[in-house]
Image (tube, rainbow, N blue to C red):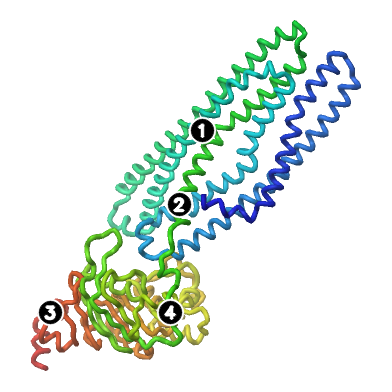
Amino acid sequence: MNSFKFLKPYRMTMFVAIFFLLLELVVELFQPYILSKIINNGIVHKDLAYVSKWGIIMIVLSVVAFLAGVLNTFYATHVAQSYSFVLRKTLFEKVQSFSFTTFSFLPTSSIITRLTNDVSQLQSAVFMSLRIILRAPLIVTGSVIMALILNWKLSFILFLILPFLFMFLNWMVKKGRGLFKNVQENVDVVNSVLRENLVGMKLIKAFVRNDYENKRFQHINKNLKQKTSVALRTMEITMPVMLLFMNASILVVLWFGNSKVHTHETNIGDIVAIVNYISRITSSFSVFSFIISAFSRMRASSERIDEILTIEEDLIEKNEGNNLRNRLEGKIQFHQVSFRYPNSDKEVLNNISFLAYPEQTIAILGSTGSGKTSLFQLIPRLYEADGGSILIDDQDIRKMNSKQLRGQIGYVPQEALLFTGTIKENLLMGREDATDEEVYLAAKHAQIHETILSFPNGYESKIGQKGVNLSGGQKQRLAIARAIIRKPSILLLDDSTSALDLKTEASLIEALKNYKCTTLIITQKITTAKNADKILIIDEGQLVEEGTHDSLLNSSKLYKAIYYSQYGKEELMDVKGAN
């Protein structure tokens, strides 16, 4: 299992924990043996000195066992906590390296469950292995050996019972593994619905969908309860079966031991010690149902974590490719580019070709679902094109170092996503080494500086999760400021001015001219598009029209229709007359 290779740095600590565990077990296993000697040689012969001597030794050994147990717990806890820390850190770094293609195969809720719940399961498994899981079989093995040393004839019953019990345990482990894997998958579903509800709480309340969502959550929560109950009930069968056979073995020992005592073939002390050893075996078996349950969960969680660890890193995210020694000029060329999303047969983009020269502004129009955002995601190599080629400064982007390429691109997604922290911290995500003056300038160009200063703490004001305490327009302008603070060679604005009024948007577009970058803007507004150097109209994944505002107004029926829908027929006639 790949997930357990992270225990290697803690091998020495694990050996120390196991040493104290073995010391505790040796002491515990010798106590019934000493007790048999006290009974046979002390109590039977009424030798108080002998009883006192070995009684004191037993007390000292008990203290030793107690201290060894405490130290074992300390080191076991250290190993388990350190292991889970490294594993969680490694998993998070691995997830950070995933391409968008990989994320399409692993739902966000499943990844969250694996990094939290599944890692916690393995952490518990490591601790219990060093403290409980390892202890139980050693107690069983040691008790059998000591019982045989005392009287192999009376202890022979253990040879008949234990192999059957171990086969039964092995079967239960395999059964539990499948059941608990099913449980963890249902935890994924619960987390998915829970996350979806928390994110969309405003919409749920606005549409009065509380009752519906409660019923939906109750249904999937009930499924999780049922799957967990089935798994736990199945594992609980272990305990009664174990106790049945072990208590039966005690009765057999007492029955035959009684006759052996009368014929002087054995001593009372030996019988007491053997019963004591069987009782220890029984107590160890009593936690086996718990151990099997934990082990089954561990196996299921380990397999789910291994799925993440063994995912081969995408070549894009390995940052392979030619290093970019100089700043990009920003020339962008799409040559017969086609693209479809993973696990989809539908082409989102089909044979797209266009050319954008450095420092040009390109406006992209199209209906919802036409492929505009997909086109944007190909430029920073968030996805790879399935056909054709994308060139930047006449270089194929597939041959470029993806990290360095993205470092020269300012990307503002359709949904302005902000992170918990201060406004300044969010802006510095664009460029960590930006000075205060550069932060303020970017905010001014994004038309958000004055708004920030109106907040009680200015740039140190806290932003709630996903910018919950900001308006849509404020979030969009902060996202734009975050993108332009890095002074990109290419700026991608995915419908990022939709929440802005015309005056603010016009000031923003004018301010962007201060940045020597090629700007691509996805927009639905003619007011934004008409000032662009070139307009691309995309429909159902195909580039259907291309040109300037004036040329398209004269030649494109589709552009005329868009213009008419926003300005009206009279305005369109006025424009024609002016031309």
What number is the disc on residue 170?
1
Mark 3 or 4: in front is 4
Left/right of residue 438 with respect to residue 261 in the rendered view: left
Q: At numbered mark 3, what does the secondary structure look like: helix, strand or loop?
A: helix
- Residue type for callout 3: Tyr
Left or right: residue 5 versus residue 334 is right
- Of callouts 1 and 4, which one flags the residue occurring earlier in the amino acid sequence? 1
The earlier-in-sequence mark between 1 and 2 is 2
Q: Reply above or below: 466 against 520.
A: above
- Residue 6 image point, x, y percent: 58, 55
**Which residue, given by chain and number where applicable, does mark 4 sit on?**
322
* Mark 1 secondary-structure assignment: helix
Determine the image quadrant of residue 154. top right
Residue receiving disc 3: 564
The residue located at (67%, 13%) in the rendering is 254
Which comes before the other along the chain, label 3 or label 1? 1
Disc 2 target residue: 113
- Residue 463, given in percent of the width and then of the height, sits at 46, 69
Q: Are marks 3 and 1 in contact (CB under 8 Å)?
A: no
Q: Nearer the viewer, residue 304 or 421?
A: 304
Disc 1 to disc 4, C-alpha distance: 54 Å
Which label sits in the foreground, 2 or 4?
Answer: 4
Nearest the camera: 349 or 469? 349
Can you say whether 28 is above or below 550 in the image? above
Estimate the spatial distance between the alpha carbons at disc 1 and disc 2, rounded to whole Å.
28 Å
Q: CA distance from mark 2 to mark 4?
A: 37 Å
Tell me how far mark 3 sits from mark 1, CA to CA: 74 Å
10 Å neighbourhood of mark 4: few (<14), some, or many (≥20)? some
Nearer the observer: mark 3 or 1; the answer is 1
Q: Given the image, on which type of amino acid does mark 4 rest?
A: Asn
Q: Nearer the viewer, residue 204 or 233?
A: 233
- Identify the amino acid type marked 2: Thr
